[in-house]
Every structure is written in C-alpha cells, then in structure tokens.
Image: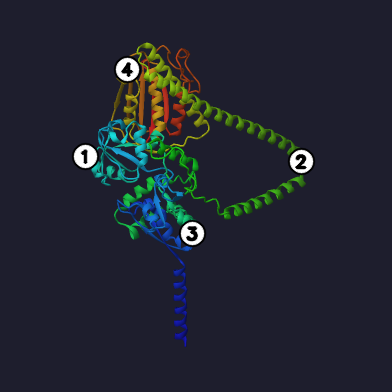
C-alpha cells in the first residue's frame, strides 16, 4: 500500500512537471555573432530562470559569418534577434522590424590600421576590410573626406591576423575583439573611432517583427523585461557569467579573452548613467540623419512604429519608496511636534527660517532661469553664426583672387569660427553636458594630425619617446592640444619654431604622458601666470588680435575633467605649457 502511494506521488509530480513544461512558450533568439560575452545578458536570463519565470523557453542561436538576424526573424526562424543601428535601413527597405531595447548605448565599431597609417586620410588608395552592417564606418569615412570608392575594399576575414600579416592596411572591428589579439602579439596598431567625428551610433539592439509585436504583445513585453534583467545580472556577476559561457556555450575563446571583452563591453552599457535598455528618439533621429547624409535614407524618413513603447513601468519601486517616505515623514512629524511642545518660542524662528528659505528658493529659480536662457541663447547664437560662416567660407573658396586680402579674410573666418566653437564648448562645460568617453588612443598620432592641419606644419617640431597607450577621451584631448598648439602659433614670433616634447611621466605612482609646448613670445608678450587660465583672460598685448579669452580656460577645465594637470611657466625666455594626462 505504501509503495502504491509513493508511485502515485511520483506520477503526480511527473504530470505537474510535464504540464509546467508544456505551458512554457517556445521562442528563438537569433544572435548576430558567435557566443561571447557580447551576449552575456541573454545567457544570464536563461541560467537564472528569468525567461522561465516569464513563461518562456528560449533557444539562443549563435550566428555564422553570413547569418542575417533580420531575415531569420522575418522568415519566422526566430522571433527575436540582436542587430545594429542598421535596423533603421532595414525598416526603410520595407522590412517590418521593431527595436525593443538598446543594449549598448555606444557602438563598439572602430577602424584599426597598420602603424604606418598616421591619419585617416592616409587610407585613400589603401586596402581596407569592412564587415557588413558597419554603415557608421562608411559615414565616418565620408565625413572625413574619404568616400568608399577612394579605398580598396576587401572581403572581411574576421581575423585580426589579416592586419598584422600585411594582407590589408586597415580593418573594421570591435573594441572588445581585435585589440585583444593586437596586444597579445605586441602589434603597434592605430585606432580611428567614428565618435571622434561626432558619429555616435547605438551598438547592439534587441529587436522583433511587427507581426510578433501585434500577435503576442504580452510575450514581447515579458521577453524584453527578462532579457534586460539578465543584462543587469551579467553586469554585476561578470566572472560567474564568463564561467557559464565556457561551461555551456562555447570554449572558442579563452577566459582571459572573455574578461577583456567584458571590460570593454560593460562601459558601453553606460549602466551608471541610464537604465539598461533605454533608447532616445532624438538619438535615433540623429542616426537617421547621419544615414541620410551618406545617401542611405531620405532626410524625412519617419521613425513611427520603429521603436517599441515600453511606457508601462513596474511601479513596485514607487510604492515601496512612497511607503518609506511616509514612514520618514511620520518620524519627522513626531520629532517636530515633540520639539514644538518643549519650546513654543521656536515657532517665530521657524517662520523666519521659512521666509529665508523661500527667498533662497526664488533666488535659485531665478539663477536657473537665467542659466537656461543663457544656454538657449548660446545654442541659437552658435547655430545662427555657423550658417553665415559656412556661406562666407564657400564664397572665399571659389574666389580666384589670391594675395594678402584673401589670406587675411581666410584667417578672419577661421578666427570667427574658432570663437564660436569655444563659446559652444564653454556652454557645454557650464551646463555639465560633457561626459568623457574613455577609449584607447596614441597621443603621438593626435599630435601628428594637429600639426598637419595647423596651417603652419613647417614651424612645428615634435620630439617624442616611446609612449604608452592612453585611455582617455580623444575628442577632449584633441581640443586641449589643439588650443595649446594654436595659441603657440598665434602668439609667437612669425616664422619662429614651436617645440613640442612628449614623454612618459609617472606622477604619484600613476603612469601617464607629459606634453610640453614651447614658443618664443611675440608682440603679445608673456601671460600673467596668476591669470593665464582664467575665463576671458587675455594679456594686454594680445588685444590687437582676435580671440575669446576662453582657450586656456577650456584647456584647464577639460584637463581636470580627464584627471590630468596643466601648468604654465617661462623657461629661457620662452613660454612653456606642460600637460600631463594619466594612462
């Protein structure tokens, strides 16, 4: 009898498990590449049971080199996929794709070149391997004056050794992949990022089809939420997820590689700034405009229906916060009442404090309104000035006349453009809109590019030792060095030599690079060391030349933003600025 009861219990348990398993909806997620940490959030959602809790049984399928995730989803082989910002192009081509969430807020695409390629323009006529769906790199090349028909495009080998063995001069790749192999081989490569030209695409995006969204809206919502929950877990348990990948998904990559990949990928989530999965319609509009600039989209392309509306948030956190706030208010009220009963004289003082607080509040609001008005005015001013400056620049460009007049006009135009740009940078700084984007770079490459574009390359001498790779914001560093070099040219004696020295420099046990810019002072004389980095400061002798007085102020502010130091002194009757940037 006991045995019969046990058998019945086992049978019931089996029936319950079978019923539970059959209740799970079977779906497929098509990845855009082979198994790696790039897809860690989906593995974590699977392993932690987030998909199962959402009533889903998910089959995660890796891609081969020629797999097209969009085709897999639209043909019904998968219900969900991982794609790039080129989903916009698919939508424009009439393919009904819907982006559900942005996983990587910044794209990992970069161009890696052989060490002899010192600037992007040197790729003209050279061999380059560009992988499919890297349209942002085409936009980058075009913006830098290198349309695709001016390079020799080769089929992508998906192997970093192609560059190291000289089979190509440049190769597209991921910040989390190729640099690992370059560093292992001690290969001195060059890096070119679209973000240095203002092209900032999204990275991996989770997407589905319009049919799936319309037929299974609850499943879409559940799958998206479970996936993003998985990414949150992967961010907080990297080593655990790396072990999971090696144990259950792929041993193609080593543990060392996966750790390197995770170190590069997690910052692309920008988890400390915004919620994982967040997407901004204005950012998608900017991406669409970039595509339009290279002829891949019409300028009036509509984004309607392209972005998933996840506007039904889980309010559990709100109710918990509200309850906590009510408890805090109750405690504060009790303490306030107790104090009030002890000494009623505090009431008059309380009223006085309230008057003061209201006055301060109104003052703060007035200041905030003033700053907002200043910001709007600066936006309007810089925008309105850039258009006539561009028109004048084009007019000067077609003038046949040469000589002192045209040279003075060109210089005046560059001065005006520089003042407008510095005002825009100051406004961004004061509005706290500048967030450094850290990426590997080589300072000698930046110096070489600045010399070639300076208008006086023959006057600039650069001496550098073997320099370490920096991890810093390339655009801000370029602005800092550009201002220092530009000032040296502008305020030195005509035809005099501008000396630049770059060398490794460890400070407080932190490795870094020091760059020294030296020049003989011109008619403007020597700056005041106590005021040289002050806002709007210009030395008495400099007022005969155009300028905003913002260049060195921005140099100092941007350097602090990068964790560096900048100093000014006079050595052997020469002006010397010394910049230090940590590695």
Image location (x, y in percent) of residue 65: 30, 51
Q: Which residue is mark 2?
A: 347
Q: CA distance from mark 2 to mark 3?
A: 61 Å
Q: Earlier in the sequence, mark 3 or mark 1?
A: 1
Of the pair 108 and 490, the residue shown nearer to us: 108
Q: Earlier in the sequence, mark 2 or mark 3?
A: 3
**Label 2 vs label 3, nearer the camera:** 3
Q: Which residue is mark 1?
A: 166
> Quarter of the image holding residue 506?
top left
Q: Circle 2: is it few (<14), some (14-19), or many (20+) Cα within 10 Å?
A: few
Q: Is 184 rendered above or below residue 421?
A: below
Which residue in the rendered view is the most extreme toward the front?
94
Q: What secondary structure is marked by label 3?
A: loop
Residue 20 makes an appearance in the image:
yes
Q: CA distance from mark 1 to mark 2?
A: 82 Å
Which residue in the rendered view is the most extreme toward the bottom?
1
Q: Are marks 1 and 4 in contact (CB under 8 Å)?
A: no
Q: CA distance from mark 4 to mark 2?
A: 72 Å
Marker disc for residue 216: 3
**Label 4 vs label 2, nearer the camera:** 4
Residue drawn 47% across and 74% down? 16
Q: CA distance from mark 3 to mark 1?
A: 51 Å
Q: Circle 3: is it few (<14), some (14-19), or many (20+) Cα within 10 Å?
A: few
Q: Earlier in the sequence, mark 1 or mark 2?
A: 1
Q: CA distance from mark 3 to mark 4?
A: 70 Å
Q: Which residue is mark 4?
A: 497
């Amino acid at each position: 009898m006991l045995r019969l009861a046990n058998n019945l219990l086992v049978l019931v348990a089996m029936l319950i498990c079978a019923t539970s398993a059959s209740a799970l909806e079977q779906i497929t997620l098509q990845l855009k590449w082979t198994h790696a940490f790039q897809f860690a959030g989906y593995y974590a959602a699977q392993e932690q049971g987030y998909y199962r809790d959402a009533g889903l049984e998910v089959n995660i399928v890796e891609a081969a080199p020629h797999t097209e995730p969009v085709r897999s989803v639209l043909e019904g082989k998968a219900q969900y996929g991982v794609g790039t910002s080129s989903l916009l192009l698919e939508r424009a081509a009439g393919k009904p794709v819907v982006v559900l969430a942005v996983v990587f807020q910044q794209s990992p695409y970069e161009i890696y070149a052989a060490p002899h390629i010192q600037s992007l323009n040197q790729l003209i006529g050279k061999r380059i391997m560009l992988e499919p769906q890297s349209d942002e790199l085409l936009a980058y090349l075009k913006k830098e004056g290198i349309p695709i028909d001016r390079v020799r495009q080769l089929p992508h080998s998906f192997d970093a050794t192609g560059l190291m063995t000289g089979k190509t001069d440049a190769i597209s790749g991921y910040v989390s992949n190729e640099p690992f192999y370059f560093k292992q081989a001690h290969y001195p490569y060059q890096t070119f990022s679209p973000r240095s030209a203002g092209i900032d695409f999204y990275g991996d995006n989770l997407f589905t089809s319009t049919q799936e969204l319309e037929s299974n809206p609850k499943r879409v919502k559940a799958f998206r939420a479970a996936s993003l929950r998985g990414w949150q877990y992967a961010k907080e348990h990297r080593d655990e997820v790396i072990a999971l990948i090696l144990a259950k998904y792929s041993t193609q990559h080593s543990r060392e590689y996966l750790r390197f990949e995770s170190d590069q990928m997690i910052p692309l989530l920008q988890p400390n700034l915004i919620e994982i999965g967040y997407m901004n319609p204005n950012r998608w509009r900017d991406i669409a405009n970039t595509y339009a600039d290279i002829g891949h989209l019409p300028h009036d392309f509509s984004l309607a229906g392209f972005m998933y509306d996840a506007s039904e948030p889980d309010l559990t956190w709100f109710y918990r916060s509200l309850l906590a706030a009510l408890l805090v208010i109750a405690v504060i009220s009790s303490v306030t009442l107790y104090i009030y009963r002890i000494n009623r004289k505090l009431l008059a003082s309380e009223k006085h404090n309230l008057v003061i607080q209201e006055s301060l509040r109104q003052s703060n609001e007035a200041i905030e309104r003033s700053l907002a008005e200043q910001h709007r005015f600066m936006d309007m001013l810089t925008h309105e000035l850039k258009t006539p400056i561009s028109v004048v620049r084009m007019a000067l460009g077609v003038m046949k006349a040469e000589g002192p007049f045209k040279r003075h006009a060109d210089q005046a135009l560059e001065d005006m453009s520089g003042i407008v740009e510095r005002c825009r940078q100051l406004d961004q700084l004061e509005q706290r809109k500048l967030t450094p984007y850290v990426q590997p770079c080589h300072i000698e490459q930046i110096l070489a590019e600045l010399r070639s574009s300076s208008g006086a390359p023959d006057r600039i001498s650069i001496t550098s030792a073997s320099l370490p790779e920096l991890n810093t914001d390339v655009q801000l560093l370029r602005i800092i060095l550009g201002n220092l070099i530009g000032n040296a040219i502008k305020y030195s004696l005509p035809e005099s030599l501008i000396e630049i020295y770059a060398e490794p420099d460890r400070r407080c046990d932190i490795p870094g690079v020091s760059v020294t810019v030296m020049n003989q002072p011109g008619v403007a004389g020597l700056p005041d060391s106590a005021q040289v980095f002050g806002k709007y400061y210009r030395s008495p002798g400099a007022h005969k030349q155009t300028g905003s007085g913002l260049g060195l102020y921005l140099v100092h502010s941007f350097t602090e933003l990068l964790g560096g130091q900048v100093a000014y002194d006079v050595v052997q009757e020469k002006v010397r600025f010394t910049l230090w940037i940590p590695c």
